[in-house]
Amino acid sequence: MLFSLPALPPLLKPNQRLLGLDLGEKTIGLALSDVRRVIATPMYTIERSKFSKDAAELLDIIAKQHVGALVLGYPVNMDGSEGPRCQSTRQFARNMEEKTSIPILLFDERMSTMAVTRTMLEADLSRARRAELVDKMAASYMLQAVLDTLSQQAAP
């Protein structure tokens, strides 16, 4: 079932992590939170193939890392409208719902890839290195925004 950000905290058990996914057409960037859900760390990028193979790899990570929820980057257009990539992301989420009972959150990722790319340009990374890193860094950037929002909601 898809959940909103405010509905997520009561669904999480202590020490469960969040797994952030930046879904591209060819790759999926992965980022993982710490058990306190304060810091997002880029993991790696997986090459997309058939959904069943991608899902199996994600389910393995979910089990091994004690993941309590998935955070999928939701690629809305700059004007807030939803295009074909949003439909694809929703379909991926629906397919994952059939494989796992953990909550799935769609989170607006509009600026994540742009922000990460700008940072990597400022760091003078080569085009090849940027291409290698961008998906997992975008997943981490988006997941960190979720963690920051959750911590602000929890503050008195």
Image (cartoon, rainbow, N blue to C red):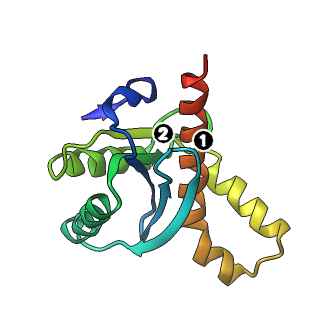
The residue that appears at 16% across and 53% down in the rendered structure is: 99
Residue type at numbered disc 1: Ala
Circles 1 and 2: CB distance less than 8 Å? yes
Residue reaching furthest to the top: 156
Quarter holding residue 38: top right
Rate crowding at label 1 as few (under 14), some (14 to 19) or many (20 or more) other CA atoms within 10 Å: some
Q: Position of residue 57 (x, y in %)?
A: 28, 69
Which is nearer the eye, 88 or 153? 153
Secondary-structure class at tag 2: strand
- The dot on residue 57 is none
Quarter holding residue 79: top right
- The dot on residue 107 is 2
Image quarter (top left, top right, bottom left or bottom right) of the C terminus = top right
Q: Position of residue 65 (x, y in %)?
A: 35, 60
Residue type at numbered disc 2: Phe
Rate crowding at label 2 as few (under 14), some (14 to 19) or many (20 or more) other CA atoms within 10 Å: many
Q: Position of residue 43 (x, y in %)?
A: 50, 68
Q: Position of residue 66 (x, y in %)?
A: 32, 54
The residue that appears at 29% across and 52% down in the rendered structure is: 92
Residue reaching furthest to the front: 14
* Residue 84 seen in the current view: no
Is 111 placed left or right of 136 in the picture? right
Quarter holding residue 103: top left
Label 1 or label 2, whichever comes before in sequence order = 2
* Residue 48 seen in the current view: yes
Q: What residue does disc 1 label?
A: 145
Q: Nearer the viewer, mark 1 or mark 2?
A: 1
Secondary-structure class at tag 1: helix
The residues bearing labels 1 and 2 have C-alpha atoms spaced at a distance of 9 Å
The residue that appears at 42% across and 46% down in the rendered structure is: 71
Which is nearer the eye, 71 or 41? 41
